[in-house]
Amino acid sequence: MPDGTRSPDPEDNEQAALAEVARRYAVAITPAMAALIDPADQADPIVRQFLPDAAELETQPGELADPIGDVAHSPVRGIVHRYPDRVLLKLLHACPVYCRFCFRREMVGPGGEALSPGELAAALDYIRERPAIWEAILTGGDPLLLSPRRLGETIGALDAIDHLGVIRLHTRVPTVAPERITPPLLAALATDDKAVWLALHVNHPRELTPAGLAAIRDLARAGVALVSQTVLLKGVNDDAATLETLFRALVKARVKPYYLHHADLAPGTAHFRTTLGAGQALVAALRGRLSGLCQPSYVLDIPGGHGKVPVGPCHLEGSDAGGWRVTDPAGRAHAYPPLRD
Ligand SMILES: *Cc1c(COP(=O)(O)O)cnc(C)c1O
Ligand code: SF4
């Protein structure tokens, strides 16, 4: 080391790196999640999901600012229309927590404004004018951060669109900020015609606190159908025992595990990504050991906006004789005969 220089204090370096992470990406945790942090746990899954880490400054080749191609499919502000029968309606950019692995991390944050009244009207017109749209998916940002009044107005407008069958909300609020699930909010979710489905983002069984479970119960009693989405995350839930506990706890709470997402190629998230092979091995391990109700579909959102596809282990192979080879949950192969016309 040249004379006159002092090696920087590693703690100062760490502080500077965390300040840089916070400058680039939004940071927030709720009281309900902060209360779950176990200071004795060196690998705390709550810390890992919500507290910034210097590793986020390392972007890898192949990581993308818009990993699932939202921008390419956005015909008007607030709408993402990739599949003919359903659209995303992004009402706001804010979330109650900012997940360190977020696939929309370049877009979400407290600074991003909600849709203006004019933009919301244009987005609703877009849905109204297209009879092929059957499902409106409120996402963001987190739609349950809206006031019950504003949320109720949007739900009411969607409820009045004849060709819609389903209003779906993607949210983390019931578990990370259960105090928001109040009677006025439940009233805002009431519809005359549409089915209201809520897709709860939850990654670790510890997130299902008694208050969160009570909020889920209130939603179920209000007639909201519940499914879950989990992101497969290294060091948070990438082991069969954690996933098994999570999926059982969800089904027990009347939430059907819907998707297990392979982590997207968002910038600075390599430390969270498992390999697809590791994901398939986990899903295969759960197949024999968990009730069908507890099995989500393992999906990959193809980078570039090409859509989500199942990427779980395949149990069926064509055999040379024209029939099939089927693998059972224990890994044994069985023949299935070719069918004749
Ligand atoms: C994920 C996603 C949906 C919803 O897909 P489902 O498979 O129905 O859950 C819809 N639109 C876009 C753009 C999406 O990324
Ligand atoms: S709740 Fe969803 S949109 Fe918000 S930070 Fe987490 S992953 Fe991103």
Image: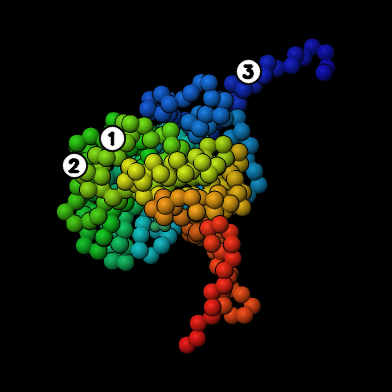
**Badge 3 element:** helix
Q: Distance between the Cα atoms at labels 2 and 1?
A: 17 Å
If you read the primary sequence from the N terminus, does the residue marked by circle 2 or circle 3 appear first?
3
Discs 2/3, front: 2
Residue type pointed to by label 1: Ala
Residue type pointed to by label 3: Asp
- Quarter of the figure that contains the N terminus: top right
**Badge 2 element:** helix
Disc 2 target residue: 187
**Residue at the image point whose x is 60% and y is 30% from the top:** 54
Residue 96 percent location from the top left of the image: 38, 33
**Contact flag, marks 2 and 3 (Cβ < 8 Å):** no
Disc 3 target residue: 12
If you read the primary sequence from the N terminus, does the residue marked by circle 2 or circle 1 appear first?
2
Q: Is residue 240 left or right of residue 227?
A: right
Cβ at disc 2 under 8 Å from ligand 2: no
* Residue 214, disc: 1
